[in-house]
Image: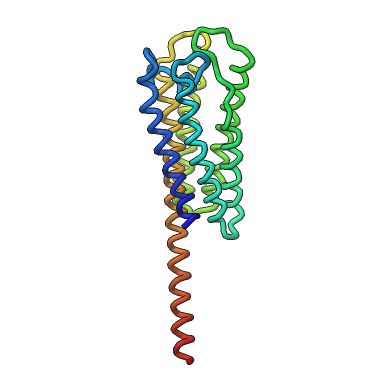
Amino acid sequence: MIRKTLLICGVLSSLFYVGINIFVPPLFEGYSSVSQTVSELSAINAPTRTLWILLAVIYILLFGAFGFGVRMSALGNRRLRITGLLIIIYVIINVYWPPMHLRGNEPTLTDTLHIVWAMMTLILMMTIMGYGAAALGKPFRIYTILTFLIFIAFGVLIGVDAPNIPKNLPTPQIGIWERINIGAFMLWVIVFAVALLQKNTSLLSRKYEHSREVSHQTGGSA
């Protein structure tokens, strides 16, 4: 029951993150989810910075719980155990993000560190997906490869526009490109969590059937 609850936290973490991406932006006057990045919601002096950080903590806690659920579901599966560990490492790194400045401000060390954190997070996301796919069957691996292709395609589009942010130049669709990538990862987590829940349900069912057979045979022998 504990393992099932922790795995459900994976689904809840993704739904919650999508939810705060809908709830918070309207509170930032002039903010556009189409042309601005998610990080700008928590930028230095952004009116939504404090709220975003508080809500992001809830996401981190849910996703961290999911990581422990994945490890509990490993049952001898080394790749699944590593996936759970990587999720926990991802959570630790994401407990604190060096904030970026609002557009038009001169970049400082914190902006550079923000980019470093973003790259580390992206690498971890892809590594988590890679190990998670390797731990499950072929259909899930194909689905993960398709998610990787989305990451690469829209990651290139983000990279083209990103240098314009500190210069306060137009980034017409960077918010869409980034949210597609984020959404792809959130959806992957949900599918992964559901797959593990189904796997655990199947395992428990087999154990129950085996227990009934053993009980029946023992009763028959008596």
* For residue 59, above or below residue 5: above
Residue at horizontal 58%, vertical 28%?
A: 96
Residue at horizontal 45%, vertical 80%?
A: 213
Position in image of residue 110 (x %, y %): 61, 17
Answer with left or right where residue 179 lies relative to residue 63: left
Position in image of residue 171 (x %, y %): 43, 14
* For residue 149, above or below residue 171: below
* For residue 98, above or below residue 104: below
Position in image of residue 120 (x %, y %): 60, 31
Q: In which quarter of the image is residue 116?
A: top right
Residue at horizontal 51%, vertical 39%?
A: 61
Answer with left or right where residue 122 lies relative to residue 31: right
Q: How many marks?
A: 0
Position in image of residue 162 (x %, y %): 51, 17
Q: Quadrant of residue 216?
A: bottom left
Foreground residue, 204 or 146? 204
**Colour scheme of the picture:** rainbow
Foreground residue, 83 or 153? 83
**Going by the picture, which residue comes out furthest to the right?**
109
Residue at horizontal 55%, vertical 44%?
A: 130
Foreground residue, 4 or 139? 4
Answer with left or right where residue 213 lies relative to residue 84: left
